Amino acid sequence: DSGVTQTPKHLITATGQRVTLRCSPRSGDLSVYWYQQSLDQGLQFLIQYYNGEERAKGNILERFSAQQFPDLHSELNLSSLELGDSALYFCASSVLGTGRNEQFFGPGTRLTVL
Amino acid sequence: AQSVTQPDIHITVSEGASLELRCNYSYGATPYLFWYVQSPGQGLQLLLKYFSGDTLVQGIKGFEAEFKRSQSSFNLRKPSVHWSDAAEYFCAVGGKGNAGKSTFGDGTTLTVKP
């Protein structure tokens, strides 16, 4: 158990809908990362937050947004969902969010868009 | 820009045999390097990391990796593979500075034959 929690574990929804994925980092970790893992794209970095502020952005679509709240939990919002958004979404956390910090990964949320 | 290449998509070894998973990176300075393992249905877990100093680093579960600057490589090794090592392995390079964005390779899937 990494100490990172993600809810829900599974999510099934329809195209065009909007969903919110939630992540609670390990106690004491200030930085949160979001990743998307699919069979054709592999593990893709989406976005990083540090202590409530956006720190780095990866291949995140404009239909996706995220935020980190004062209690350090984070939410990833996915809107106007398409079939291709079906994937495993991971949240990870690290202590300070620098490149030398190990990232602790949550178990993931499996999103299926029908 | 930093990048990671894992040349082998899939490797099969017999239980008890030795293992080497290849990782090549591209980065302008001495990188922060990581190996993570992902068991089926799980998030990623750190096996080991390299920042500086001794180029041979030891990790959990009997794994080790060697940093070779001249070859821009950070290959993962294990002298004797166990059936429980069957998983997907990711090499990652961490960025310098405040942004903790890590770039992950596409992963190598390890199958262990009895």
Image (cartoon, coloured by chain):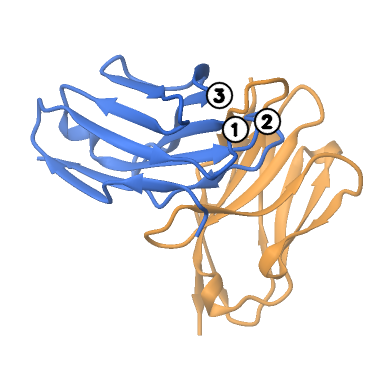
Query: Which residue sits at x=29%, y=36%?
Result: A21
| Most foreground residue, B91 or B17 | B91
Q: Rate crowding at label 3 as few (under 14), some (14 to 19) or many (20 or more) other CA atoms within 10 Å.
A: many
Kindly check if marks 2 and 1 are in contact, taking CB atoms under 8 A apart as contact.
yes
Q: CA distance from mark 2 to mark 3?
A: 12 Å
Above or below, B7 against A94 in this view is: below
Tell which subunit mark 3 falls on: A
Q: CA distance from mark 1 to mark 3?
A: 14 Å
The quarter holding residue A43 reads: top left
- Find the residue positioned furthest to the top: A62
Q: Nearer the viewer, mark 2 or mark 1?
A: 2
Viewer can see residue B4: yes
Q: Which mark is residue A99?
A: 2
**Image x and y of residue B32, in percent:** 74, 36
Query: Which residue sits at x=72%, y=20%?
Result: B97
Tell which subunit mark 2 falls on: A
Chain letter, colour orange in render: B
Viewer can see residue B110: no
| Most foreground residue, A23 or B85 | A23
**Image x and y of residue A56, in percent:** 53, 19
Q: CA distance from mark 2 to mark 1?
A: 7 Å
Query: Which residue sits at x=64%, y=37%?
Result: A95
| Quadrant containing the N terminus of chain B in the rendered view | top right
Which residue position holds label 1?
B102
